[in-house]
Amino acid sequence: MFYGEYLHSIDRKGRLILPAKFREVAKTHFVEKFLVTRGLDKCLFMFSEEEWRLQEGKFKAIPFTKQESRTFNRLYFSGAVEATPDRQGRILLPQYLKDFAEIKKDVVIVGVSNRIEIWSKDKWQAFYGNSRGTFEEIAEKLMDT
């Protein structure tokens, strides 16, 4: 559903404009609201409301009697915020999420099929630089069935 990599900036009011392609996809799929939370690798995860509910069901199925489950769910769900784009496609990111992802001004918005990831530009460049050389190795390991 969401694909591509886009460089954007946080405006002086703390808003982030979603890429036009993502706004088009959202409109086509009747997505009016997103949920944004702490992601992995120091980025933010952004899901459509429908996809959020699917992910939420998976996480709720993990036994809360396990410490790791409780810790993950606390951090993941406590960070969640609803984000409804305005007419210009802008969303407001709370300061605590920007702090978590070390976002200052420049961001990279990455479409990862069922979710959108929001990265600080520096963090994305470091991740990409460290990961691109192992892309084929990872593919072989994951696809070796």
Image (cartoon, rainbow, N blue to C red):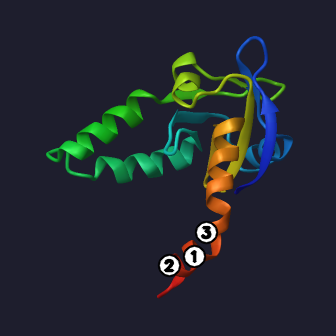
Answer with left or right where residue 99 lies relative to residue 135. Answer: left
Residue 57 shows which numbered tag?
none
The reply to whether the C-beta atoms of the residues labelled 3 and 1 are less than 8 Å apart is yes
Q: Quadrant of the N terminus?
A: bottom right
Residue 137 shows which numbered tag?
1
Secondary structure under tag 3 reads helix
The residue shown at (56%, 81%) is 140
Q: Earlier in the sequence, mark 3 or mark 2?
A: 3
| Label 3 crowd (10 A; few <14 / some 14-19 / many >=20) | few
- Which residue is the site of mark 2? 141
For residue 57, above or below residue 134: above
Q: Amino acid at mark 2?
A: Lys
The residue shown at (18%, 43%) is 67
Of badges 3 and 2, the one in the foreground is 3
Q: Amino acid at mark 3?
A: Thr
The reply to whether the C-beta atoms of the residues labelled 1 and 2 are less than 8 Å apart is yes
How far is the residue under mark 3 from the one under mark 1? 5 Å
Camera-nearest residue between 17 and 58: 17
The x, y position of residue 50, in whole percent, is 55, 47
For residue 139, above or below residue 94: below
- Which residue is the site of mark 3? 134
Answer with left or right where residue 124 lies relative to residue 143. Answer: right
